[in-house]
Image (cartoon, rainbow, N blue to C red):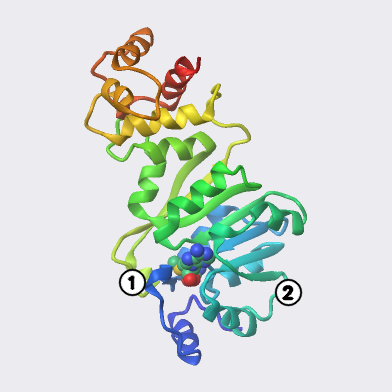
């Protein structure tokens, strides 16, 4: 069988099917075998695992996943890619299920139930236009997923992994780190894809925590506080909280909470840890 990590094979498949790339679906196919191995290694895929691949494209990573995992469920929105996967590039794999659907509408719990009930490992070279909704959707719904190892835009990976005080630290860092432990496994240049994207990429692994990183009285309040803190990044936290419609407190109350935590009135959200945001949120729950 021909492996698609060889760019000549990718070109041959694209020509065989007269495939036209659809920009609106974020189609940048991988053409580098080393990068493929890096993603699959970072995901720690074994013959015990059921993998959910988001956006298999022509099946470049699907081939490697089918050879490493017990089962692979691949969900692809572009119906023009389905015959390429099922009749051609991945036809030999009897452990592959291809679903033609928008991943944002997929019931991941149902997929896990149908395929043995164990938490899934999500592995993907994601379509960049919906990276955040895909990842936050999985995390917020507490979908049965053990880990998420994905290629994303470099800047997004850096934001997910950033800690307090860094320029990349923000609401996305806190939301991701509340649910998961994040680490960047590799940086990947544009020439590893066809067509080349205009941005750099990175492989990030999110290992889902059994319980969130901090415990709070009200999760919704925590995320309201975080959003308010970063909505106007250059403002002080007292102003951010006091001006927010989502957070039930005046500037004076916000200042009093910060004072009780030993923080100055001039402090900005970007220097606070997740534990400190949790403390503020708990103070606001009556
Ligand atoms: N995995 C392939 C590879 O690495 O060569 C393709 C990756 S490409 C960056 C993203 C893939 O996601 C494309 O095949 C695209 O059609 C698919 N896609 C885009 N939006 C999607 C969605 N909402 N649901 C499922 N698949 C989607």
Secondary structure at badge 2 equals loop
Q: Position of residue 32 (x, y in %)?
A: 44, 71
Q: Residues within 10 Å of mark 1 (few under 14, many from 20)?
A: some
- Disc number placed over residue 181 in the picture, else none: none
Residue shown at 53% from the left, 26% from the top: 214
Q: Position of residue 43 (x, y in %)?
A: 56, 53
**Pointer 2 or 1: first along the chain:** 2
Question: Would you identify the image quadrant in which residue 50 lies?
Answer: bottom right
The vertical placement of 91 against 273, above or below, is below
- Disc number placed over residue 94 in the picture, else none: 2
Q: Nearer the viewer, residue 116 or 43?
A: 116
Judge left or right: residue 154 versus residue 49: left
Secondary structure at badge 1 equals loop
Residue shown at 36% from the left, 29% from the top: 245
Q: Position of residue 256 (x, y in %)?
A: 34, 9
Q: Is residue 33 visible?
A: no
Q: Which residue lies under the disc numbered 1?
A: 196
Residue most toward the front?
Answer: 245
Question: Would you identify the image quadrant in which residue 202 lies?
Answer: bottom left
The vertical placement of 203 against 208, above or below, is below
Q: CA distance from mark 2 to mark 1?
A: 32 Å
Q: Is mark 1 within 8 Å of ligand 1?
A: no
Judge left or right: residue 179 versus residue 173: right
């Amino acid at each position: 069988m021909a492996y698609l990590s060889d760019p000549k094979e990718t070109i041959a498949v694209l020509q065989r099917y007269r495939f036209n790339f659809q920009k609106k679906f974020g189609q940048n196919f991988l053409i580098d075998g080393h990068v493929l191995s890096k993603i699959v290694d970072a995901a720690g895929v074994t013959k015990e695992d059921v993998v959910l691949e988001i956006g298999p494209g022509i099946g470049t990573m699907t081939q490697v996943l089918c050879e490493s995992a017990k089962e692979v469920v691949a969900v692809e929105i572009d119906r023009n890619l389905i015959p390429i996967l099922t009749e051609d590039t991945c036809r030999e794999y009897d452990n592959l299920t291809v679903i033609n659907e928008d991943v944002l509408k997929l019931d991941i719990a149902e997929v896990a139930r149908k395929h043995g009930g164990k938490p899934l490992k999500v592995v993907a070279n994601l379509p960049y236009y919906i990276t955040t909704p895909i990842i936050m959707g999985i995390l917020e719904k507490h979908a049965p997923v053990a880990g998420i190892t994905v290629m994303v835009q470099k800047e997004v990976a850096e934001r997910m992994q950033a800690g307090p005080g860094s320029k990349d630290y923000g609401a996305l860092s806190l939301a991701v780190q509340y649910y998961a432990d994040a680490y960047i496994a590799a940086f990947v240049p544009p020439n590893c894809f066809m067509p080349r994207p205009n941005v750099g990429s990175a492989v990030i692994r999110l290992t889902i925590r059994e319980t969130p990183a901090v415990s709070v009285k009200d999760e919704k309040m925590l995320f309201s506080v975080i959003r308010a803190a970063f909505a106007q990044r250059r403002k002080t936290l007292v102003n951010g909280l006091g001006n927010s419609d989502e957070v039930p407190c005046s500037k004076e109350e916000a200042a009093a909470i910060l004072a009780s935590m030993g923080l100055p009135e001039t402090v900005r959200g970007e220097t606070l840890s997740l534990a400190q945001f949790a403390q503020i949120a708990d103070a606001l729950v009556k």
